[in-house]
């Protein structure tokens, strides 16, 4: 597995978020597929880790995929490529590197800040 220790932060969700993944290109050729389910485990401005029943042959093919999920009533869409894969029972866990521009990265950071504040507030009111 490859980790990006130089990244500013990575937000890990207590309960994975429901998301969808769609293949856009395989080996540089347009190959749009129907979306398949994904559980978003963590996110950073540059990528994410997700679990899915879909088995992508990472070493054999080069994929461009789109991941989408909702966070704080915002739909986040990330375009990029899976960079590693680890078997997890009947599913696989993928490391995904996004191809986001600076504005999209800032939007992801802002959405995560709002999500964290809401989560902290919800936990504090339960006490």
Image (cartoon, helix red, strand yellow):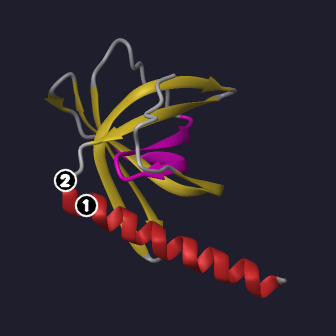
Q: Residue at x 51, y 47 (%)?
A: 37
In this rendering, is residue 89 above or below 15? above
The residue closer to the viewer here, 24 or 106, is 106
**x and y, in percent, of residue 29 in the image:** 15, 28
Q: Is disc 1 surrounded by few (<14), some (14 to 19) or many (20+) residues within 10 Å? A: some
* Residue 101 numbered tag: 2
| Residue at the bottom extreme of this rendering | 125
**Is residue 71 something one can see in this rendering?**
no
The quadrant in which the C terminus is found is: bottom right
Give the total of numbered labels.
2
**Is residue 119 something one can see in this rendering?**
yes
Q: Which residue is mark 1?
A: 104
**x and y, in percent, of residue 66 in the image:** 31, 46
Q: Residue at x 35, y 44 (%)?
A: 22
Q: Residue at x 40, y 38 (%)?
A: 6
Q: Is the C-beta separation of discs 1 and 2 under 8 Å? A: yes
Mark 1 and mark 2: Cα distance apart in space: 5 Å
In this rendering, is residue 98 above or below 3? below
* Figure quadrant of residue 26: top left
* Figure quadrant of residue 90: top right
Q: Is disc 2 surrounded by few (<14), some (14 to 19) or many (20+) residues within 10 Å? A: few
Asked whether 50 falls inside the magenta stretch, the response is yes
In the image, the segment drawn in magenta is: 33-53
């Amino acid at each position: 597995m490859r980790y990006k220790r130089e990244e500013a932060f990575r937000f890990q969700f207590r309960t994975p978020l429901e998301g969808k993944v769609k293949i856009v290109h395989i080996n540089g050729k347009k190959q749009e597929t129907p979306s398949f389910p994904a559980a978003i485990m963590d996110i950073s401005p540059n990528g994410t880790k997700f679990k899915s029943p879909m088995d992508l042959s990472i070493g054999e093919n080069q994929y461009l995929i789109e991941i989408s999920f909702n966070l704080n009533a915002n739909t986040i869409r990330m375009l990029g490529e899976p960079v590693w894969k680890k078997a997890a029972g009947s599913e696989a866990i993928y490391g995904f590197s996004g191809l986001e521009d600076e504005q999209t990265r800032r939007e992801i950071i802002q959405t995560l800040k709002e999500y964290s504040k809401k989560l902290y507030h919800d936990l504090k009111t339960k006490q």
